[in-house]
Each structure stands twice: as structure tokens, then as C-alpha cells.
Amino acid sequence: MAEDDFGTDISWNASTTELGTVTGEENMIQSIKNRLQTSYDELDWVYEDYGCNYRDYLGLKSDDESLEFVKNSIKDSLEADDRIGGFDLELSYVGDGVVNVLLNVDGTGFEFNLGEE
């Protein structure tokens, strides 16, 4: 997939209060983080099928069944984005119910953990 296939969007740096733009892979990463950090249908007045239900797992046991629930929620959310043709998703517990998310989108080779800046 070409770099410009991921589009352009507005970027906000809260620490410097600077407004800018992001393009390419950087935009895709921002877009995915925004989608996954938004509760499903939180923005239903603007977007259809936007957001993720992974927060519903909070309070569940730290077991394989809960991890599969989170993985399926993230997978469903990513599949709703037309720009994402394929992805590999790996989840693991890192302690005290914290889930590490590794994502490789469309073979671009970029991976990130949710919650990282």
C-alpha cells in the first residue's frame, strides 16, 4: 500500500498546543488509536460503526477468555475501517489486567502498543 493511501488528518500536540497535520503511516497510527480509544457509538451522531468495545472487559478476570473478548472487540473495530485491508493482531497480559496490543497493518511493518504516545 502506498504511503499516501493512508490519507491526511489534523494532529494536536497537547503539550505544545500546536495544531498540524499527519499523513501516511503516522496518520494511520493516529486514526487507529483514536478509533480504539473511543467507545463504540460514542460518536454515532457523526460516524456509523465507529469506536471499540474493548473497555467492556474492565473488571473481568485476567484469563484467556477475557483476552479473546478484547481481541475480538479490537478486530471488529479495525475491520470497520475501509483503509485497513489486513492486519495481524497479538495481545498479551503484562500484569494487573493491563493488555499489551501489537498491531501490524497491511504489511507496512509498523507496530505499536495502545496507550503509547
Image (cartoon, grey):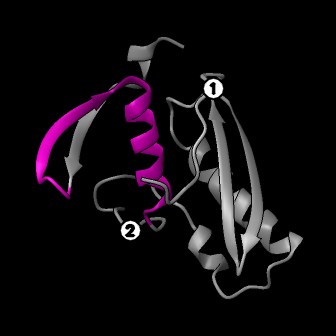
Highlighted magenta segment, given as a residue range: 14-38
14, above or below 21, in the image:
below
Report the residue marked by disc 1.
109
| The image quarter in which residue 10 lies | top left
Q: Which residue is drawn at 40% across and 32% down?
A: 26
Q: Which residue is drawn at 58% across and 68% down?
A: 53
| SS label for mark 2 | loop
- Residue 33 is left or right of residue 57, and the answer is left
Q: Magenta stretch containing residue 29, yes or no?
A: yes
- Residue 54 is left or right of residue 29, and the answer is right
Report the residue marked by disc 2.
42
Pick the front one: 84 or 62: 62
Looking at the image, is mark 1 or mark 2 nearer the viewer?
1
Mark 1 surroundings within 10 Å by alpha-carbon count, few (fewer than 14), some (14 through 19), many (20 or more): few
| SS label for mark 1 | loop
Pick the front one: 69 or 89: 89
Viewport quadrant of the N terminus: top right
Number of labelled discs? 2
Q: Residue extending furthest right?
A: 64
Percent position of residue 106, x then y: 62, 25
Q: Could you tell me if residue 49 is visible in this image?
A: no
104, above or below 2, in the image:
below
Q: Which residue is drawn at 43% across and 15% down?
A: 3
Q: Which amino acid does label 2 sit on?
A: Glu
User: What mark, if any, has residue 85 been given in the picture?
Assistant: none
81, above or below 15, in the image:
above
Q: Which amino acid does label 1 sit on?
A: Gly
